[in-house]
Amino acid sequence: MSETWKRRTKMVHSGSRRSQYNEVSEAIFLTQGFVYDTAEAAEARFIKAGDDEFIYARYGNPTVAMFEDRIAGLEGTEDGFATASGMAAVSGALTSMLRAGDHVVSARALFGSCLYVLEEVLTRFGVEVTFVDGTDIDQWRAAIRPDTRAVFFETVSNPTLDVVDIRAVADLAHASGATVIVDNVFATPVFSRAVEQGADVVIYSATKHIDGQGRALGGVILGTREFIRGTVEPYMKHTGGSMSPFTAWIMLKGLETIDLRVRAQAETALRIANELQGDARLARVIYPGHPSHAQHELVTAQMGQGGTVLALDLAGGQGAAFRFLNALDIVVISNNLGDAKSIATHPATTTHQRLPDAAKAQLGITPGLVRLSVGLEDPDDLIEDITRALDASG
Ligand SMILES: Cc1ncc(COP(=O)(O)O)c(C=O)c1O
């Protein structure tokens, strides 16, 4: 890979490895294992595998390695480890580096499964977790201690789209020697400059914008070579959360078009936000790229654009939200995001259903809140569909 390539070139070419056939499109090495010429060669590879040597697909595979190299090249990290899902990446990054007695500070506004890992799993193994309001830098300052091993946050939170100031939190964390781990799903690899802004480890659910066409689950952990190969890989390869070669191929193809897709989706999301602002049926229209967002200045500095997701809070509560969802024609009711197809989700009864009502209220997950992931359909058709469904919600 040429270090001078710009991002769109890296999205198409980084990490490519050609077989003896010199194929144009990346080959799918759909094999669990690899043959050794001799018993001595097998022994030597188990002692130390070279850069282009593989042992078993749970440890690594040429197609998976292409995906890891491409996304690492894009994000600007030394290395990456591809995982079976976004949650395998979140839990793998945290569990591989933490041990009983460690302290972690995390933003409270998280995707339900991320919250489960921090609140239920890590604490069960003796890790102490302090939750803070991720948008309040004073709470981070008060919570980070000399013994804090890691801080964790979604750079843009699911589903209320709070934005955390990566640079400010990273400065505090680094002063205590803590590792900054960010779940960067909503920022997308297109708008992310997380490493430049201070993140040490960047995580994506590749299920979202990287695939972008609703086909496969996947994830990736990005960081220094030492962290990925020394900490993450031993844990992942022995516990079994690796990405399959076929999934890696889908994700490689996704990366080729991600820039075009995500920019078009973000442009439509802004148009929808502009259209819906001030609509009396909506108590709130939350879109990080709109000037009305409480942290719009930070969004502009950190991401440049607002991303592909909006949150609409229907003034009529859950009844109105359900009538709105049921009246949508083009936008489908589902729970993925970043897809070519626009998707609407009711977080309070689905992705965040597990949370007690008080916790939902604290996070702003109101009964009327609908998360809208904007796809690649014609913007006029989407606006017509959404406004017609709003008419039916009253
Ligand atoms: C912010 C965030 N992190 C992680 C995940 C988990 O990703 P996956 O479904 O690929 O496991 C999601 C999924 O919705 C998410 O929104």
Image (cartoon, rainbow, N blue to C red):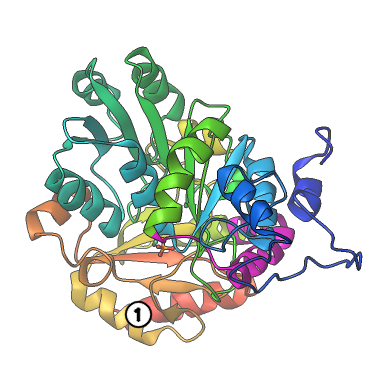
Quadrant of the image containing the N terminus: top right
Q: Residue at x 48, y 46 (%)?
A: 233
Tell me if I can see residue 278 in this picture: no
The span picked out in magenta is 240-267
Please identify the residue farthest to the front as the structure is shown. 39
**Front in this rendered view, residue 203 or 127:** 127
In the figure, is residue 352 to the left or right of 1?
Answer: left
The quadrant in which residue 176 appears is top left
Q: Residue at x 37, y 25 (%)?
A: 169
Q: Residue at x 47, y 65 (%)?
A: 337
Quadrant of the image containing the C terminus: bottom left
**Front in this rendered view, residue 46 or 324:** 46
Residue 193 horizontal/vertical position (percent):
58, 35
Tell me if I can see residue 325 in this picture: yes
Is 378 included in the stretch rendered in magenta? Answer: no
Q: Quadrant of ligand 1?
A: bottom left
Q: Residue at x 38, y 49 (%)?
A: 92
Residue 319 horizontal/vertical position (percent):
20, 78
Q: Which residue is identified by label 1?
A: 325
Residue 352 horizontal/vertical position (percent):
23, 63
In the figure, is residue 119 to the left or right of 182?
Answer: left
Identity, as a three-letter code, of the amino acid under mark 1: Leu
State the SS at label 1: helix
Magenta stretch, main secondary structure, is helix
The quadrant in which residue 85 appears is bottom left
**Front in this rendered view, residue 126 or 2:** 126
Q: Counting other residues with Cα less than 10 Å from the Cα at mark 1, is it few (<14), some (14-19), or many (20 or more)?
A: many
